[in-house]
Image (spheres, grey):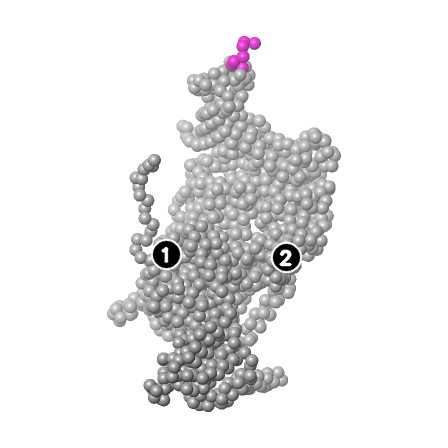
């Protein structure tokens, strides 16, 4: 009896090993899809564009090749996302692999028509990661956006992703949005998602060829372009500039930006650069009516002073602070009012009411996206602290003889 | 049909093996004892040894008792100075004492009064005589007596005590064991000057009759373990023992395991330290490798130097060793698993680079891995056989050059070469060779598992190994203590090496009774506070 | 019953690994929305009471496992029926957890591999472990416990440093009052995972210091309860209630969101490692209880002989209990707690306790040693 069991076990084990490995994917058999673009065709079908990496042309210099293009874009047309991916297998010589898809681009037209049908497949799929960044191709199609080659980043999708990451920290007009954020925004009755916009500047026909990379100023390049308000899964409005910064402020994603104020009659005389800001929004009831108080605290430096001013005097700084506070309050209020006009609560004020006044929220939420948000009373209070003025205290203009 | 012949085969096998056992032993000594006639004795001796020319028979006249005598010794095994100066000098030149003593005690007189050698024994049985003769002692046969004397004249060429080549340290004693068992036991005795250090000897091996000694400290070592060791050694029935490895294979716990359950070392300080913890040391004549039982898994990760250096450095290095062991175990398997099943785990840029490298390679990752691993094993074996000056260079340069050439030929990818190299280096960093070999073998199994099922396979393999390790016992002590079962006080000397004054207790499961080894309040004295800078 | 002794620390580790094993992975109490963690703590409290019941039963019959003292309490015929019921119950639960494990692995990692292969390989390992005995399994548990805890702590800090935790997701607390919390506790969390400690009535007799076992058991269950509550808190804080409710494996979704320092991302595989280890122990302990119980009821001397055949039965049962994963889950949420857990974990033991209490009162303090 002793020899029987090991024999049985060996039989079982060898059936496992001999019958082959099921889920095995060799690296050379998969196509790494770095970015997916979604558009709508005239007949109502979806068009998916896959930006696929050509590894030999991307990797380090020790490999053979490196002359060809780093990416290739393939298109498929279908009625739903899953079949789009599977139809792609007819065009690409490898298995489409979505685990490294770091970017999803949605064409503006499709965004305006409605994006809700797109997201379930993205969320459910096990290969697709929900930390994928998402972007709307503004003034164009996703397909064109994905075709543009970029001089500094070998993989164009990386350029888009990294641009958003860095601009979020530098000027704050775009915030990094991934699929998870968008879906939670869809579901929550008290918040709406925003999605970044990206545009092609220049001639997009040359953008997809090698010639684009062979001049110091590329014929076509990609740039971030505003934030899109999404309501009920549809793109309803674009905001840029200060209005876009407001979203970043209130969601506490902006790290730094710059504020200009006039001084002594000169426009844009002093520029204040925020190093750190923190925004707190508190819901409250004023006379039974819902209202939000937004507290912004920022500290930063004077980055530019274009007229004689004594920056060593704390009293002068105090005055500057007050001016800056007013300027910021105005801008933020404007930004909120713009969202209110669109009846799109991108700031999550509704959610804050839910957290603090759950029972009241039950009544408010049906109406929130219409009148509720619009009629919300807003109060903005900013507190500005100028901490330093970098490497010079008084501007050189102060010491010039009167010119 | 098959069943009856199956049974018949079995029976035939059993009968054959029984017959073989009986006829196995080749040395049949027809007569067992000496006779009184000197010439006959010498004839018997010469017959049995087939007139071997290295047996020197020196006849002489023993003045003291006026009889013919002969000294028989093996050239090359004896210290000829003692023979000529002490033995022959005393036997030939001592004046006659026939008058003073009666005939009956002559042998005793020679033994006690005449011969000036360190140790004398009387021998009557032939096999005992041959044992002494072949160990290097001189046999003194006297005409008219059927008892011979055996004088201790052991000598001959043995290697001098030098640093062992397999266990080098930067700081620590530089003596190592040699092939002579007495030197070895002396080296340990020198370190433990305690009368409780007891030594027992036995002869194992029907043909070789090798000397085997066990050493332990009475009062610290567990009596049950000592008697178990003794019993197992006594049960060994084989014709030859050439190295301690033979004995190890006989006395280790009977589990089909890759992992060693008996520790061995070439360094006397290591053996002494183990004896002090309550273990039993087994010395085998003819090999510098001394065994220690019982052994624990964690011992194979400890080096002598850990105890001589500072505790923080030793702790860091011990952590490194554990990491290194894991790398040598699952290194290639992880690479295979990640590149064939879990590509989502790798950062995007890295996976693209690796893919670019693999575009040129025709094999799937597992085949590549096996090719590289086997090549490395071949290189390693070759490096062992080459003469020393060339050996080192060829191993390292060979590996690099072959790796580079293979990459350029498109047979393997550079990433694979790096993984395999790191794994190989990691397996050298394990302090004990026995465990490194185990890891080398298991690595292949885990690679295969990784190729079939990715990380799940690797994990299952590791669980299997863990269950196996935890089920092992070495002479009754669980192999994985003190980690499992957890004994907190002994944890101070496992992956960490706590300062010496903290390691107060001996390993509990090895020496049950005598546990404390450090006295009270042994922590270093506090610095004198309030010392001023004085000019 | 085999000839083995467990130390207190080993019992602690076994209970902790068992409780945390698969529960860390699935949703617990999410029907109470963001108050799920409160249901867990409440379930913990009830579970501690249940543990005291089981421990007390074991202490009336020292060195006797459940199938043995059931016969003492309820008579040989009825007692062996109760024994068989429990053995089948344990086997079914082992198959449930095995199915959970296989489905999870299939879902996110090995979608092309047939379920039976994944299950079979796990069962092979478990059979190997169980055939070596409870001592070996306890020691293996000690080894893996350290590793698992290290993983957990590192994971916790990574989630912290990734800035994913948003405490606001946990508010408002008691949004719908205390009623849903109590309902969910009584329907789910009390039984899974806390009532499942009944399986330790087959293991408690092996303790070397039985008296201290009660304290250790309570500690272990409390610690695992706190772990689970903390995990639920983190899951809800990171994902929000909605995603939590819709994910079959919320911890996986949480781990997928980790992005620290640009290279510490895509860490799902570590989740898989923790899952494999945890499930291995949970299934092993259930399986061990079942094997030992059967070998005791059928008077087989060595339980090792039964391990392999029962392992095959385990694989088959795990494939047969449900045809799809949602069916498996629905069964587990609606049918099993009410018709299986409630009688086997609460009603029967209480009944046994009451009877043994009266019996031992009659015998005096002789049995209380």
Q: Is any atom of residue A227 visible in this view?
A: yes
Q: Which of the pair C220/B187 is nearer the observer? A: B187
Q: x, y (%) of residue B185? A: 43, 68
Q: Residue under circle 2?
A: B394
Q: Which residue is drawn at 50% across and 27% down?
A: A274
Tell me the quadrant of the picture where the C terminus of chain B can be found: top left
Q: Which mark is residue B503?
A: 1
Residue A240 versus residue A149 in the image, above or below? above
Mark 2 lies on a secondary structure that is helix
Tell me, yes or no, if residue C198 can be seen here.
no
Q: Where is residue A373 in the image (x, y as percent from the top left)?
A: 50, 31
Q: What stretch is highlighted in magenta?
A: A397-403
Q: Give the spatial CA distance, label 2 vs label 1.
A: 44 Å
Left or right side of B434 for A99: right
Label 1: how many Cα within 10 Å (few below 14, some 14–19, many 20+): some
Q: Which residue does the image show at 30% across and 41% down from the upper left?
A: B529
Q: In which quarter of the image is residue B494?
A: bottom left
Residue drawn at 53 percent across, 23 percent down: A303
């Amino acid at each position: 009896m002793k020899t029987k069991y090991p024999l049985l076990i060996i039989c079982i084990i060898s059936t496992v090993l001999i019958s082959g490995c099921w889920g095995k994917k060799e690296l050379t058999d998969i196509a790494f899809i770095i970015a997916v673009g979604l558009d709508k065709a005239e007949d109502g079908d979806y068009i998916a564009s896959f930006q696929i990496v050509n590894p030999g042309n991307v990797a380090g210099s020790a490999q053979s090749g490196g002359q060809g293009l780093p990416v290739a874009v393939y298109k498929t047309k279908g009625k739903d996302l899953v079949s789009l991916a599977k139809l792609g297998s007819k065009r690409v010589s490898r298995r489409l692999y979505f685990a490294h898809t770091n970017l999803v681009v949605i064409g503006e037209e499709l965004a305006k028509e409605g994006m809700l049908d797109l997201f379930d497949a993205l969320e459910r799929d096990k290969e697709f990661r929900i930390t994928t960044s998402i972007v709307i191709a503004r003034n164009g199609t996703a397909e064109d956006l994905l075709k543009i080659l970029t001089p500094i980043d070998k993989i164009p999708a990386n350029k888009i992703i990294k641009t958003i990451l860095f601009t979020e920290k530098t000027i704050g007009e775009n915030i990094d949005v991934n699929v998870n954020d968008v879906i939670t925004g869809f579901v929550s009755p008290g918040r709406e998602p925003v999605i970044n916009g990206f545009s092609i500047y220049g001639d997009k026909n040359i953008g997809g060829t090698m010639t684009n990379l062979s001049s110091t100023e590329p014929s076509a390049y990609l740039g971030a372009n505003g934030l899109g308000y999404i309501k009920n899964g549809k793109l309803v409005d674009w905001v840029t500039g200060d209005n876009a910064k407001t979203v970043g402020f209130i969601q506490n994603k902006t790290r730094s930006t710059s504020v200009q104020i006039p001084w002594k009659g000169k426009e844009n005389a002093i520029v204040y650069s925020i190093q750190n800001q923190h925004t707190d929004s508190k819901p409250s009831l004023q006379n039974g009516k819902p209202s939000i108080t937004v507290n912004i605290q920022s500290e930063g430096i004077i980055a530019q002073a274009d007229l004689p001013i004594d920056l060593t005097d704390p009293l002068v700084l105090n005055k500057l602070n007050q001016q800056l506070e007013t300027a910021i309050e105005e801008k933020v209020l404007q930004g909120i009012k713009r969202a209110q006009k669109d009846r799109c609560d991108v700031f999550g004020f509704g959610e804050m009411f839910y957290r603090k006044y759950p029972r009241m929220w039950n009544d408010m939420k049906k109406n929130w996206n219409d009148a509720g948000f619009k009629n919300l009373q807003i109060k903005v209070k900013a507190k500005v602290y100028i901490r330093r003025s970098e490497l010079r205290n008084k501007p050189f203009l102060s010491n010039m003889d009167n010119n | 049909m098959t069943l009856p012949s199956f049974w018949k085969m079995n029976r035939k096998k059993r009968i054959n093996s029984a017959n073989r056992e009986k006829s196995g032993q080749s040395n049949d000594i027809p007569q067992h004892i000496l006779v009184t006639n000197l010439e006959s004795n010498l004839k018997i001796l010469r017959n049995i040894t087939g007139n071997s020319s290295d047996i020197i028979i020196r006849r002489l006249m023993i003045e003291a008792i006026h009889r013919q005598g002969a000294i028989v010794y093996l050239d090359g095994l004896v210290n000829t100075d003692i023979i000529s100066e002490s033995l022959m000098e005393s036997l030939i030149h001592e004046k006659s004492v026939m008058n003073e003593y009666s005939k009956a005690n002559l042998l005793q007189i020679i033994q006690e009064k005449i011969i000036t050698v360190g140790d004398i024994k009387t021998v009557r049985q032939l096999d005992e005589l041959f044992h002494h003769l072949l160990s290097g002692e001189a046999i003194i046969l006297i005409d008219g007596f059927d008892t011979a004397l055996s004088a201790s004249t052991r000598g001959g060429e043995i290697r001098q005590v030098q640093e062992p080549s397999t266990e080098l340290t930067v700081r620590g004693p530089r003596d190592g064991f040699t092939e002579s068992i007495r030197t070895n036991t002396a080296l340990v005795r020198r370190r433990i000057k305690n009368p409780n250090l007891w030594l027992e000897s036995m002869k194992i091996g029907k043909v070789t009759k090798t000397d085997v000694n066990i050493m332990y400290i009475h009062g610290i070592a567990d009596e049950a373990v000592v008697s178990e060791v003794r019993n197992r050694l006594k049960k060994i029935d084989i014709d030859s023992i050439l190295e301690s490895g033979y004995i190890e294979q006989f006395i280790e716990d009977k589990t089909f395991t890759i992992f060693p359950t008996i520790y061995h070392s070439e360094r006397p300080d290591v053996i002494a330290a183990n004896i002090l913890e309550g273990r039993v040391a087994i010395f085998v004549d003819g090999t510098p490798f001394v065994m220690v039982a019982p052994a624990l898994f964690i011992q194979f990760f400890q080096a002598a130097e850990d105890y001589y250096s500072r505790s923080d450095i030793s702790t860091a290095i011990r952590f490194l060793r554990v990491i290194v062991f894991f790398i040598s175990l699952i290194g290639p398997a992880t690479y295979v698993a990640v590149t064939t099943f879990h590509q989502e785990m790798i950062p995007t840029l890295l996976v693209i680079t690796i893919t670019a490298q693999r575009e040129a390679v025709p094999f799937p990752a597992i085949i590549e891995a096996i090719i590289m691993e086997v090549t490395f094993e071949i290189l390693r074996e070759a490096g062992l056989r080459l003469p020393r000056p060339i050996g080192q260079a060829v191993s390292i340069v060979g590996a690099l050059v072959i790796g580079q050439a293979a990459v350029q030929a498109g047979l393997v990818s550079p990433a694979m070469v790096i993984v395999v190299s790191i794994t190989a280096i990691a397996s050298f960093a394990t302090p004990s060779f026995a465990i490194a070999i185990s890891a080398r073998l298991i690595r292949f199994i885990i690679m295969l598992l990784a190729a079939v099922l990715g990380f799940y396979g690797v994990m299952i393999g590791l669980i299997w190994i863990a269950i196996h390790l935890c089920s092992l016992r070495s002479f009754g002590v669980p192999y994985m203590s003190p980690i499992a079962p957890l004994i907190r006080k002994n944890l101070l000397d496992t992956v960490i090496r706590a300062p010496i004054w903290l390691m107060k207790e001996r390993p509990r499961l090895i020496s049950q009774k005598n546990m404390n080894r450090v006295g009270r309040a042994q922590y270093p004295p506090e610095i004198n506070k309030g010392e001023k800078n004085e000019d | 019953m085999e000839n083995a002794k467990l130390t207190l620390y080993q019992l602690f580790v076994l209970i902790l690994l068992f409780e945390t094993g698969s529960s860390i992975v699935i949703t617990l109490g999410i029907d109470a929305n963001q108050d799920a963690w409160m249901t867990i703590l409440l379930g913990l409290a009830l579970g501690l009471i249940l543990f005291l019941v089981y421990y007390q039963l074991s202490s009336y019959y020292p060195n006797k496992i459940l199938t043995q003292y059931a016969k003492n309490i309820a008579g040989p015929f009825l007692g062996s029926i109760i024994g068989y019921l429990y053995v089948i119950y344990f086997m079914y639960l082992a198959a449930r957890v095995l199915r959970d494990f296989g489905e999870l692995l299939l879902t996110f990692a090995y979608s092309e591999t047939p379920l039976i292969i994944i299950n079979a390989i796990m069962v092979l390992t478990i059979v190997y472990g169980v055939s070596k005995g409870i001592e070996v399994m306890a020691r293996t548990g000690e080894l893996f416990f350290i590793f698992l805890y290290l993983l957990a702590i590192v994971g916790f800090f990574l989630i912290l440093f990734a800035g994913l935790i948003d405490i606001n997701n946990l508010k408002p607390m008691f949004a719908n009052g205390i009623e849903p919390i109590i309902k969910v506790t009584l329907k789910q969390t009390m039984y899974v995972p806390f009532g499942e400690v009944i399986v330790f009535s087959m293991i408690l007799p092996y303790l070397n210091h039985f008296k201290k076992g009660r304290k250790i058991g309570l500690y272990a269950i409390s610690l695992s309860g706190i772990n689970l509550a903390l995990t639920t808190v983190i899951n809800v804080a990171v994902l929000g209630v909605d995603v939590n409710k819709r994910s079959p494996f919320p911890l996986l979704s949480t781990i997928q969101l980790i992005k620290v320092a640009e290279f510490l991302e895509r860490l799902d595989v570590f989740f898989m490692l923790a899952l494999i280890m945890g499930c291995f122990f949970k299934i092993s302990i259930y399986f061990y209880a079942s094997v030992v119980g059967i070998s005791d009821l059928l008077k087989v001397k060595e339980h090792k002989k039964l391990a392999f055949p029962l392992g095959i039965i385990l694989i088959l049962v795990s494939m047969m209990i449900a045809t799809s994963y949602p069916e498996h889950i629905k069964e587990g949420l609606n049918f099993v707690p009410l018709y299986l857990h409630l009688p086997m974990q609460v009603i029967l033991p209480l009944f046994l306790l009451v009877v043994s209490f009266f019996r031992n009162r009659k015998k005096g303090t002789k049995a209380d040693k």
